[in-house]
Amino acid sequence: MRVLGVSVVGMFSKIQAVVRKIPRGKVATYGEVARAAGFPGAARQVVWALRATNGLPWHRVLGAKGRIRLPGEAGLEQRFRLRAEGIVFRGDRVPLETYGASLGRAHKRRKPGKNEKQKRPR
DNA sequence: CATCTGACACTAT
DNA sequence: TATAGTGCCAGAT
C-alpha cells in the first residue's frame, strides 16, 4: 500500500481530512466520519485510518451514541483528553446533541442490511 | 481466492 | 437498556 506514492490515498486521506476538521471541543462518531468522507457504512475503515495515522485528533472520534469504544487504558486516556477540551460526559457517553461536530455529509446512501426490514410502499 | 479481524452501525428481540 | 445477529470495507495471512 505505498506511502507517499500512490494508493493509501482514496479512502484514508479523505477520512483523515474529515477527522482533522473536527474542531476542538467537539466530537464525531465513526459512522459520521465515514459518511462525511463519502463512505457510508465504512466506519471500520475510519478505525484503520486513525490507527495508521499519527497526528490526528483520534480522541474526538467516538462510537455510536457517543460511547467510547476503546478498551482499557486507551479509553481512559481518550476520556481524559476529551474532558481536557471541555467535553462533559453524561455517564459513559458524550451527549452528541451538544458536542457533535457538524460534518457536512457527502451524499451517498448505504445499502440497507437484509436484517433491516424495509418498509415497502403501499 | 478463502478466511479472519477490527477503537463500528443498525435492527430486532 | 442490553444482547445477538448481520452488514460493511480494506488489509493481513
Image (spheres, coloured by chain):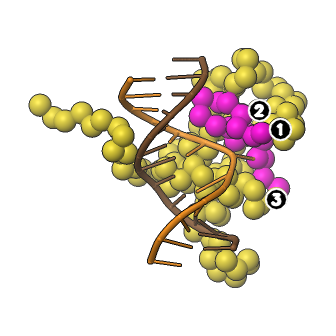
Chain colours: A yellow, B orange, C brown
Q: Position of residue A68 (x, y in %)?
A: 72, 34
Which chain is mark 2 on?
A
Q: Which residue appears at 63% of the width and 53% of the height?
A: A46
Instruction: Mark 1 vs mark 2: give the one in front.
Output: 1
Residue denoted by label 2: A25
Q: What's the amino acid at mark 1?
A: Gly
Is residue C12 found left or right of A45 in the rendered image? right
Q: What's the amino acid at mark 3?
A: Asn
SS class of the residue under badge 3?
Answer: loop
Q: Which residue appears at 82% of the width and 56% of the height?
A: A55
Q: Position of residue C10 (x, y in %)?
A: 58, 67
Tell me the quadrant of the picture where the C terminus of chain A can be found.
top left
Residue denoted by label 1: A72
Residue denoted by label 3: A54
- Ranked by sequence position, the earlier of labels 2 and 3 is 2
Q: Quadrant of residue C11?
A: bottom right
Q: Quadrant of residue A86?
A: top right
- Ranked by sequence position, the earlier of labels 1 and 2 is 2
Which chain is mark 1 on?
A
- The reply to whether the C-beta atoms of the residues labelled 2 and 3 are less than 8 Å apart is no
Q: Is residue A79 visible?
A: yes
Q: Position of residue A43 (x, y in %)?
A: 57, 49
Q: Quadrant of residue A79?
A: top right
Q: Which residues are magenta?
A: A55-71
